């Protein structure tokens, strides 16, 4: 089956801890994206990558970091600098960089202990 | 910043009725997309309409686009309980980064 997988489904973070959310796609898509969703809010763009070894900040990149060492993988690290990390995190991909339908993963819910 | 804003924020209807939700945006766009999200899940693409198109259909879905009013509407005909979800519009601004900007969504509840 082709698609996007995210893991884990739920993730708990302790104060001062960095945590990494996984996103993998086997769609051979060039571009990948990370969004944050808070209750009653739309999706806000954290980071995106249109090609391997390159990524760009979105609207709310502070407190987050990413890497794109492989085409199929785009992990997101929530650092201790992100003071309000509790949210639903969604990963998406598109075949190319522009004007495309986005394919979403099932999401990871991050909670702070 | 959010480009598209859906209206209403919440909509509650009976099965069999039609559901209409609207999206307004501020700047010129290349295309507008509608997505659906079931509670606690990822988004699923429904339909894309380009700026030179006025209406598109897909099954029970009908999308219109009025670029002069900078607005779009999504009509779901003969709704079913399984249509209960949140619906988001996403706009790709012309002359921009080609990254779609999502609105806050309309929460639709269809009562059986």
Image (cartoon, coloured by chain):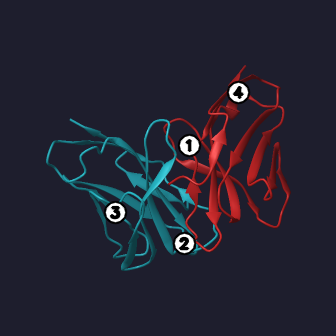
Chain colours: A cyan, B red
Find out whether the residues at labels 4 and 1 contact each other: C-beta distance under 8 Å: no
Identify residue for label 4: B81
Identify residue for label 1: B104
Q: CA distance from mark 2 to mark 4?
A: 37 Å
Q: Foreground: B105 or B5?
A: B5
**Disc 2: which chain?**
B
The residue shown at (42%, 63%) is A58
The residue shown at (69%, 65%) is B28
The dot on residue A75 is 3
**Disc 1: which chain?**
B
Camera-near label (2 vs 4) is: 2
**CA neighbours of label 3 inside 10 A, class few (<14), some (14 to 19), many (20+):** some
Residues marked 2 and 1, same chain: yes
Find out whether the residues at labels 3 and 4 contact each other: C-beta distance under 8 Å: no
The single residue placed furthest to the left in the displayed view is A16
**Disc 4: which chain?**
B
Find out whether the residues at labels 3 and 1 contact each other: C-beta distance under 8 Å: no
The dot on residue B97 is 2
Residues marked 2 and 4, same chain: yes
Camera-near label (4 vs 1) is: 1
Is residue B100 shown above or below B4?
Answer: below
Residues marked 4 and 1, same chain: yes
Q: CA distance from mark 3 to mark 4?
A: 36 Å
Q: Foreground: B86 or B83?
A: B86
């Amino acid at each position: 089956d082709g698609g996007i997988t995210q893991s884990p489904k739920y993730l708990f973070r302790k104060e001062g801890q960095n945590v990494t959310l996984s996103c993998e796609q086997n769609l051979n898509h060039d571009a990948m994206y990370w969004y944050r969703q808070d209750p009653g809010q739309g999706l806000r763009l954290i980071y995106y990558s249109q090609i391997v070894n390159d990524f760009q900040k979105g609207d709310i990149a502070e407190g987050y970091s990413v890497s794109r060492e492989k085409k199929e993988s785009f992990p997101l690290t929530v650092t201790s600098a992100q003071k309000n990390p509790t949210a639903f995190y969604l990963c998406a991909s598109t075949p190319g960089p522009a004007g495309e339908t986005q394919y979403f993963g099932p999401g990871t819910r991050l909670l702070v202990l | 910043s959010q480009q598209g804003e859906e209206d209403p924020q919440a909509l509650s209807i009976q099965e069999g009725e039609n559901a209409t939700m609207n999206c307004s945006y501020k700047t010129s766009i290349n295309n507008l997309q509608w997505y659906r999200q079931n509670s606690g899940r990822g988004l699923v693409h429904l339909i894309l309409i380009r700026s030179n198109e006025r209406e598109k259909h897909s099954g029970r879905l009908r999308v219109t686009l009025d670029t002069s009013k900078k607005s779009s509407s999504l009509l779901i005909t003969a709704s079913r309980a399984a249509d209960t979800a949140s619906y988001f519009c996403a706009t790709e601004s012309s002359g921009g980064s080609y990254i779609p900007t999502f609105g806050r969504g309309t929460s639709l509840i269809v009562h059986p």
